[in-house]
Amino acid sequence: MEQLFVTPLYASFIDSINEELSKIGSKLIPNFFSFVVQLLALIVVIIIVMVLLFKPVKKTLNKRNDYIEQQILQAKENNVLSEQNRVQSEQEIIDARKKSSEIIESANKIAEAQKAQIISEAHDSARKLKLNAEEEIQKAKQEAMDDVHNEIVNVALEASKELLKREINEGDSEEFVKDFLKEVK
């Protein structure tokens, strides 16, 4: 193997590097007391940061999270309520349609009943008018028959007076009229 020649320049270079490394090492690794003080200072800073910043931020974030969850729950409740209202509204619409159909059907039945009643009253009125007309016709016929009968009696009396040329008393005339009427009927 070949041996490396260490030149004095090279050796001084290595020594200076070793010296620099030891300085850096001493700076990197502090003494124990300084290390403990710095560690305690770090812990105090962490505690102060947690108390002053982390806890209030965490508290604010928790409040915000609770608010969001509350809003989500309220939205779900509103959705359920709106669905119930929609179902109720649909049922009310169905009930209103049924009720309107029933009202229309009832109105039609009432109209039919009134129509039947009006027709019945019209038939009764027509029948009464017909009966009254028939009675008036019968009365008029009877009056006409009575008038004709009285005229016939008067004519018969006049004829009998003429024939007999004598005055017939009232008793004779009535008897004669009754006999004449019996024959006429």
Image (tube, helix red, strand yellow):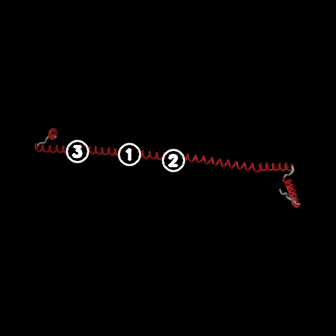
Q: Secondary structure at mark 3?
A: helix
Quick one: label 2, few (<14), some, or many (20+) residues within 10 Å?
Answer: few
Q: Secondary structure at mark 1?
A: helix
On residue 112, the disc is 1
Q: Nearer the viewer, residue 117 or 17?
A: 17
Residue 24's spot in the image, x, y percent? 85, 55
Residue at 44% across / 46% down in the picture?
101
Q: Nearer the viewer, residue 143 or 173?
A: 143
Left or right relative to 11: residue 113: left
- Indicate which disc, 2 or 1, sits on the residue closer to the N terminus: 2
| Circle 2: residue type | Glu
Q: Secondary structure at mark 2?
A: helix
Q: Nearer the viewer, residue 160 or 64?
A: 64
Give the alpha-carbon distance from disc 2 to disc 1, as whole Å. 33 Å
Q: Nearer the viewer's eye, disc 2 or disc 1?
A: 2
Left or right relative to 74: residue 92: left
Report which residue position mark 3 lands on.
141
